[in-house]
Image (cartoon, rainbow, N blue to C red):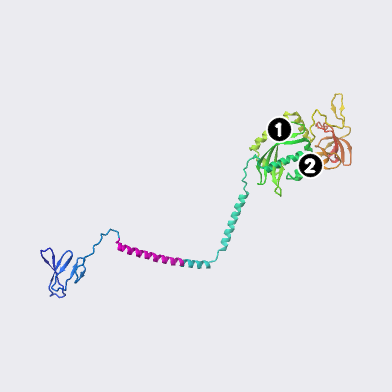
């Protein structure tokens, strides 16, 4: 190839288009678009394009105009094709994944059917869960959610129970009392009869409650005024009680008189610093004021201390007696016994009952006497002693409050002087 330098603005090259060395050179006109090769053979018009391609016998075709490429952008015709390939790949992948999923599920189901059920851990775990649940239920049921303070009673059943108790005492109704108290055997009809001779009524009853040892039990602090027959001044009084349920779920009342019982100890332990302690102090002060302010009441309480429950007889009215008083020179009345004197003994803190007849019927008790009390002996009978309550003292400097009654007492509990 040779270059002919012509001054026509074109590059002229000589190419040997033949394989042998003897071939003549052919002039080629080179331009920016193409090199036009002139040849003596009209059939040979080779074209060499600038991009390096070579197509003999063809004219250079006009290249399509290209849109300016945006860096990072893909031509639309390629985008569609790329998206289609990508979508196809995704569809193919999804189908493959679905097939794999169902294969896994089928294989898992087969393995699950073949796998043995672990009964032992299931049973142990269930037992533990049930035990924990049962324990929680027991704890919740056993918890006492009652407010642990002394408060004024708002329970109508307790209100009625306490009022029935005092009504039975007033009426000396032993049968009614047995239906009220916890221990029926503790009901002493004789003692109730004696007390009813002294106590006319129980008024202004106020009840304060405190949760008991169990949910069905309640401690009671009761204040009331005791009214005695023929005495105007009432005596402020306090008492402890406790409520329980019997086998038929009926509410029963338990007077707290035995200091050794668990109920008594429990209620007393709640007393210090409580509201009822202040109330108790107020009632005690009112009791003392009533006693000191009324000599008649004070004297009658001294009579009750000797277990003489006869009604108080006002001084303006003479007490009934079967023996005429002896008038002495000093103009004082003093009873002079006609027979020997006997002393009550061996009763162990209780009382010796005087009866209207020589039988132990409950309704024939007319009086009761404490240990050491002096009685005039009228006649000694078979196991019984006919006596008279007419002495003002027991001969040992201890004053008595004679009722002037005659009756019968057991010979086993009366010591002759």
Judge whether residue 259 can be spotted in this image: no
Q: Quadrant of the N terminus?
A: bottom left
**Could you tell me which residue is drawn at 85 percent across and 27 percent down?**
333
Q: Quadrant of the C terminus?
A: top right
Q: Is residue 59 left or right of residue 351?
A: left
Could you say which is closer to the camera, residue 285 or residue 80? Answer: 80
Closer to the chain start, of discs 1 and 2, is 2
Q: Can you tell which mark lies on residue 287?
A: 1
The residue carrying pointer 2 sits among few (fewer than 14), some (14 to 19) or many (20 or more) residues within 10 Å by Cα, namely: some
The residue carrying pointer 1 sits among few (fewer than 14), some (14 to 19) or many (20 or more) residues within 10 Å by Cα, namely: some
Tell me the magenta residue range.
74-102
**x and y percentages locating residue 42 in the rendered image:** 15, 73
Taking the magenta stretch, the answer to whether it contains residue 117 is no
Q: Secondary structure at mark 1?
A: helix
Could you say which is closer to the camera, residue 358 or residue 234? Answer: 234
**Could you tell me which residue is drawn at 20 percent across and 69 percent down?**
54
**Could you tell me which residue is drawn at 58 percent across and 61 percent down?**
123
**Could you tell me which residue is drawn at 49 percent across and 66 percent down?**
108
Report the residue marked by disc 2.
Answer: 189
**x and y percentages locating residue 43 in the rendered image:** 16, 74
């Amino acid at each position: 190839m040779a270059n002919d330098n012509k001054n026509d603005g074109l590059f002229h090259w000589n190419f040997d288009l033949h394989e042998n060395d003897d071939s003549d050179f052919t002039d080629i006109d080179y331009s920016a678009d193409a090199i036009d090769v002139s040849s003596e053979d009209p059939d040979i018009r080779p074209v060499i394009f600038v991009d390096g391609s070579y197509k003999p016998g063809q004219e250079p075709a006009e290249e399509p105009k290209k849109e300016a490429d945006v860096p990072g952008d893909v031509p639309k015709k390629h985008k569609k094709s790329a998206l289609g390939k990508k979508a196809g790949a995704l569809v193919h992948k999804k189908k493959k994944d679905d097939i794999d999923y169902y294969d896994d599920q089928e294989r898992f189901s087969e393995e699950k059917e073949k796998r043995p059920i672990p009964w032992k851990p299931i049973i142990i775990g269930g037992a533990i869960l049930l035990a924990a649940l049962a324990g929680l239920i027991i704890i919740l049921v056993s918890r006492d959610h009652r407010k642990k303070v002394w408060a004024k009673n708002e329970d109508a059943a307790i209100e009625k129970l306490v009022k029935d108790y005092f009504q039975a005492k007033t009426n000396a109704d032993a049968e009614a009392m047995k239906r009220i108290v916890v221990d029926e055997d503790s009901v002493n009809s004789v003692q109730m009869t004696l007390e009813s001779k002294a106590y006319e009524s129980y008024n202004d009853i106020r009840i304060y409650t405190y949760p008991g040892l169990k949910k069905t039990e309640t401690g009671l602090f009761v204040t009331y005024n005791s009214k005695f027959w023929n005495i105007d001044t009432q005596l402020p009084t306090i008492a402890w009680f406790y409520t329980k349920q019997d086998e038929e779920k009926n509410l029963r009342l338990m007077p707290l008189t035995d200091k050794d019982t668990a109920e008594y100890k429990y209620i007393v332990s709640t007393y210090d610093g409580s509201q009822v302690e202040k109330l108790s102090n107020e009632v005690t002060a009112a009791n003392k004021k009533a006693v000191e302010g009324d000599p008649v009441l004070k004297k009658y309480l001294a009579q009750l201390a000797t277990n003489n429950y006869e009604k108080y007889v006002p001084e303006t009215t003479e007490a009934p007696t079967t023996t005429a008083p002896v008038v002495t020179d000093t103009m004082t009345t003093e009873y002079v016994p006609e027979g020997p004197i006997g002393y009550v003994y061996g009763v162990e803190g209780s009382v010796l009952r005087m009866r209207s007849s020589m039988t132990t019927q409950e309704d024939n008790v007319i009086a009761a006497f404490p240990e050491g009390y002096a009685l005039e002996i009228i006649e000694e009978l078979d196991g019984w002693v006919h006596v008279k309550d007419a002495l003002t003292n027991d001969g040992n400097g201890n004053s008595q409050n004679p009722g002037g009654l005659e009756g019968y007492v057991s010979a086993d509990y009366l010591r002759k002087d």
